[in-house]
Image (cartoon, rainbow, N blue to C red):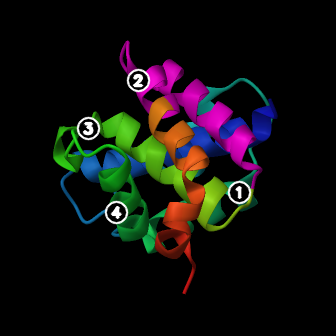
Amino acid sequence: MDDKRHLARTIVLQKLFERQFRGKNIAQSVNSEFTNEQLASINSDQEGYDKKLADELLKGVIKHISKADNVITKLAPEWPLEQINKTDLQILRIAIFEGFIEEITPKKVTINEAVELAKEFGGGPSGKFVNGVLGNLLKNENKFKRNLKVN
């Protein structure tokens, strides 16, 4: 696992969670929001994170959030979005954008990273839930091609 890329995903997860937790529009930044650098220093002793990836993921998830949410709704119909653990929801949004919408990272790597984030930040069943949803997407990707297409 590339620690700089993992840290970038962690930062994006925390920024999205913070915005959702505050009840604000997820696309709207606020002055009191933690900076990427503050989050990086909290999360790691290592030098740096992949700033380009963090910026690309945050902007991309925000831009394509409705596409990701639509796919999540279809893949997990028994779990309405408002009932999904907020951390798991952000992880799914990041992974769907990164691996399936923009295809920045190979799909299987994206799924593995998402599961690791879920284990690290989610509750007990988070890793299995995230793996199940993303595995289902990978298996049925052709059904979702139109939903994932970038306009």
* Disc number placed over residue 70 in the picture, else none: 4
How far, Cα to Cα, is label 3 from label 4?
Answer: 14 Å
How far, Cα to Cα, is label 1 from label 3?
Answer: 26 Å
The range drawn in magenta is: 105-131
Find disc 3 in the rendering and name its residue.
Answer: 84
User: Could you tell me if the residues under marks 4 and 2 are in contact, i.e. CB atoms within 8 Å?
Assistant: no
**Label 3: few (<14), some (14–19) or many (≥20) C-alpha neighbours in 10 Å:** some
Q: Amino acid at mark 1?
A: Leu
User: Could you tell me if the residues under marks 2 and 3 are in contact, i.e. CB atoms within 8 Å?
Assistant: no
Residue at 77%, 50% (x, y): give it: 106
Quadrant for the C terminus, please.
bottom right
Find disc 1 in the rendering and name its residue.
Answer: 53
Residue at 27%, 51% (x, y): give it: 20
Rendering quarter of residue 66? bottom left
Quadrant for the N terminus, please.
top right
Residue at 45%, 39% (x, y): give it: 133
Disc 2 secondary structure class: helix
